[in-house]
Image (cartoon, helix red, strand yellow):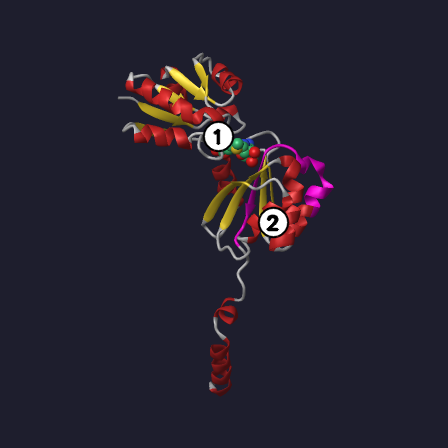
Amino acid sequence: DGALYVVATPIGNLADVTVRALAGFHAADIVLAEDTRVTGSLLSAYGIHKKLVSLREHNEREMADKVVGWLLEGKIVLQVSDAGTPGISDPGARLAAAVWAAGLRVVPIVGASAVIGALSAAGLESGQFQFHGFLPPKSGARCKTLQQWQQADYAVVCYEAPHRILECVEDIVATLGETRPLVLARELTKTFETFLRLPAGELAARIRADSNQQRGECVLIIDAAPRREAAEDALPAPALALLAELAAVLP
Ligand code: SAM
């Protein structure tokens, strides 16, 4: 029986499609896409013309049954989203679950994803991250979400719409403080790709001063909370008092 191929596509630069993805498109009987025009133009850039079927969040569940049927008939089915990796802040998870549940396989054809692209060049030290995806669009709910990361010892990767990036960074200043290190990765793989690595307060000022920073596609990384003076904060008061006493009598 067939497998469903989940295929990553470029997040800007069309050259980021993989050789394996192109081979998959050539072989496919059916390509499931979000916006069939977006995927259609990617495929036609590579001279490929295939039957495209729309799969979006709202019809993912119904489509899942059809896809399982096609796979059982031996059809080669690929799923893509508009850009990047399906299932990452994009449709795909429900479909994959349904295919596994039917006893069939799901095979990833890996490639671009904005979260990994941003992290790969961000130069963060903590080595750990949480992928959050889109923050709530309204400030109240957003601040509540942000608060949970006050003491995070890992970075948090968020996707944000460009017209909300300034208020989002301002909310970070308000909830996590102006010294919290941030990385704004904009327009990855495109002509105006920009990385801004600044403390929250300075990043807000920068975005306010330059409206170009409020355009295009954005990944915002909230780095781990700066470490407090480890020894002093970690030890309880009696231990600190004892240390002080010892320090006074030791050579
Ligand atoms: N599935 C995609 C992935 O793997 O990255 C993400 C899809 S999500 C609907 C779209 C969001 O991803 C954008 O709003 C933006 O936050 C981020 N994004 C996509 N392409 C990007 C790019 N070239 N540069 C920066 N961020 C990008």
Q: Which residue is mark 2?
A: 143
Q: Secondary structure at mark 2?
A: helix
Image x and y of residue 17, in percent = 45, 25
Whether ligand 1 has any atom under 8 Å from the Cβ at mark 1 is answered as yes
- Tell me which amino acid carries mark 2: Cys
Label at residue 179: none
Judge the density around disc 2: few (<14), some (14-19), many (≥20) Cα neighbours within 10 Å: some
Q: Secondary structure at mark 1?
A: loop
Q: What is the quadrant of the N terminus in the image? A: top left
Image x and y of residue 178, in percent = 64, 54
- Residue 59 drawn in magenta: no
185 versus 61 height, above or below: below
Label at residue 84: 1
Using the numbered discs, state the Cα–Cα distance from disc 2 to disc 1 in whole angstroms.
Answer: 28 Å
- Residue 209 drawn in magenta: yes
- Specify start and end residues of the magenta stretch as a single range: 205-224
- Tell me which amino acid carries mark 1: Gly
Observer able to see residue 164: yes
* Residue at image coords 52%, 44%: 157
* Residue at image coords 37%, 30%: 96
Observer able to see residue 110: no
Circle nearer the N terminus (2, 1): 1
In the foreground, 106 or 136: 136
* Residue at image coords 32%, 16%: 75
